[in-house]
Amino acid sequence: MSTLNYTQYGLAPLISLEQTGTKPICFNVVFGVENGQVVLRYEQPDAPGQTYIAITQNSVVEIRLIGAQIYFSKEYEAITTKEPLTSFYGGVEYEDYDETLDRYKTIRFQARFNEGGKYGTLHRFNINIDLLQDAGLDTQRWVGLTIDPDIKNPPPKDD
């Protein structure tokens, strides 16, 4: 039995960065059915096949939830980290609000490039979501889940 306590850390409420990236780094979390199986996968339009977010300069990161049943958590912050990283990430903004479900599908946050950091430095983070369960015609049931992708800041040298 584990006796370790699991802690999630919030991002900095405000962070002021001079943005050097020209457009947001888009990271999609896709939940659905493919070939008869339930799948949860990541996709990045500008980095096909890459399963982590690579920070190579001060940037805005946009995380979009794609699928009819997943939304950012109502109870918890949409994104948290597994260690204190407020000097690198902050300024979370929520977008794509669904009024009927009172939940969001997109967030953006700022990421500071880890200049001088060791190549491949791993910053583990959590995406906290609610999964919509159909509990009947007039009721909805939500199941809270945490998805666990990574940020590499800076990414490995071979990227």
Image (cartoon, grey):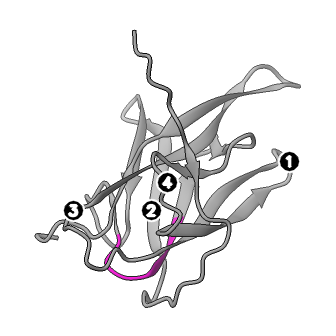
Q: Are marks 3 and 1 in contact (CB under 8 Å)?
A: no
Q: For the residues marked 1 and 2, what is the alpha-carbon distance in whole angstroms? A: 25 Å
Which mark's residue is nearer the viewer, 4 or 1?
Answer: 4
Give, as a three-letter code, the residue at label 3: Gly
Pick the front one: 131 or 53: 53
Residue at 40% across / 29% down in the picture?
A: 36
Q: Residue furthest top?
A: 1
Residue picked out by circle 2? 27
Which mark's residue is nearer the viewer, 3 or 2?
Answer: 3
Residue picked out by circle 4? 84
Residue 57 locus on image (x, y percent): 36, 82
Q: Quadrant of the N terminus?
A: top left
Give, as a three-letter code, the residue at label 4: Pro
Which mark's residue is nearer the viewer, 4 or 2?
Answer: 4
- Does the stretch in magenta take in 135? no
Q: For the residues marked 3 and 4, what is the alpha-carbon distance in whole angstroms? A: 18 Å
* The quadrant where residue 137 appears: top right
The mark nearer the N terminus, 4 or 1, is 4
Residue 120, numbered label: 3
* The quadrant where residue 27 appears: bottom left
The mark nearer the N terminus, 3 or 4, is 4
The mark nearer the N terminus, 3 or 1, is 1
Q: Is residue 156 left or right of residue 50?
A: left
Q: Which residues are magenta?
A: 55-62
Residue at 43% across / 82% down in the picture?
A: 58
Q: For the residues marked 3 and 2, what is the alpha-carbon distance in whole angstroms? A: 18 Å
Say if residue 135 shows up in the picture.
Answer: yes
Q: For the residues marked 4 and 2, what is the alpha-carbon distance in whole angstroms? A: 22 Å
Q: Is residue 76 left or right of residue 52?
A: right
Residue 107 locus on image (x, y percent): 62, 63
